[in-house]
Image (tube, rainbow, N blue to C red):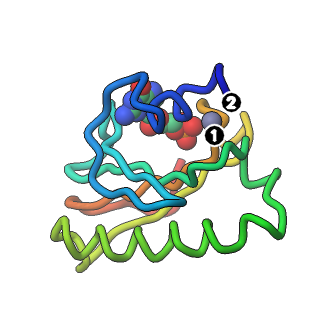
Amino acid sequence: MTDCLFCKIIKRELPSEIVYEDDDVLAFRDIKPQAPVHVLIIPKRHIASLDDLTKEDENAMGRAMLVASKLARDLGISEGYRVVTNCGKDAGQSVFHIHMHLLGGRSLGWPPG
Ligand code: 5GP
Ligand code: ZN
């Protein structure tokens, strides 16, 4: 999608600090980290939100979850981390290309706000 921030990051039209990439998934550091480790994991196919997922996204989203677990180990936070997807405006979604936040490296409160 030409107008999407994260599609532009995928196409290298915008800079980012990429920590993982394969054919279907990209992971890069959040520009405004909310924890010592804050990585965004996205499918390369443009999907607006969790609410827009279809059966054909099953593999990429499964891969994205495995990438979260691998990155947690690689980035040294496997003792405690959180994977979050905000879906829709009321949940605070601000970029409408689906993404999982991988957060760790500090104590994380519950419930989230
Ligand atoms: P949301 O609010 O949609 O759940 O999360 C969007 C995330 O994208 C936010 O944590 C925000 O800091 C991050 N973000 C917004 N613009 C950019 C950008 O240009 N580059 C990077 N790396 N992260 C961004
Ligand atoms: Zn996109």
Packing grade of label 1 (10 A; few <14, some 14-19, many >=20) is many
Residue 93 in view (yes/no): no
Question: Dot 2 surroundings within 10 Å: few (below 14), some, or many (20 or more)?
Answer: few
- Is ligand 2 less than 8 Å from the beta carbon at label 2? yes
Residue 67: x, y in percent?
Answer: 41, 70
What x and y, as percent, mark residue 108? Answer: 34, 61
Q: Earlier in the sequence, mark 1 or mark 2?
A: 2
Q: Amino acid at mark 1?
A: His
Q: Is residue 108 left or right of residue 66?
A: left
Q: Is residue 96 above or below residue 50?
A: above
Image position, residue 100 (x, y; %): 52, 55
Which residue is under mark 1? 97
Compare residues 9 and 99 and report the one nearer the observer: 9
Q: Is residue 8 above or below residue 83?
A: above
Nearest the viewer among 39 and 47 is: 47
> In which quadrant of the rendered view does residue 33 lie?
top left
Question: Looking at the picture, which amino acid does disc 2 mark?
Answer: Met
In the orientation shown, which residue stands out farthest toward the left?
76
Q: Residue 7, relative to residue 98: is it above or below?
A: above
* Tag in front: 1 or 2: 2
Q: Are marks 1 and 2 in contact (CB under 8 Å)?
A: yes
Disc number placed over residue 1 in the picture, else none: 2
Q: Quadrant of the N terminus?
A: top right
One can see residue 34 in this view: yes
Q: Secondary structure under badge 2? A: loop
In the image shown, does 97 or 56 lie closer to the viewer? 56
Residue 80: image location, x then y, percent: 29, 74
Q: CA distance from mark 1 to mark 2?
A: 9 Å
The image quadrant that residue 104 belongs to is: bottom left
Rendered image quadrant of residue 69? bottom left
Residue pictured at 20% horizontal, 60% vertical: 105
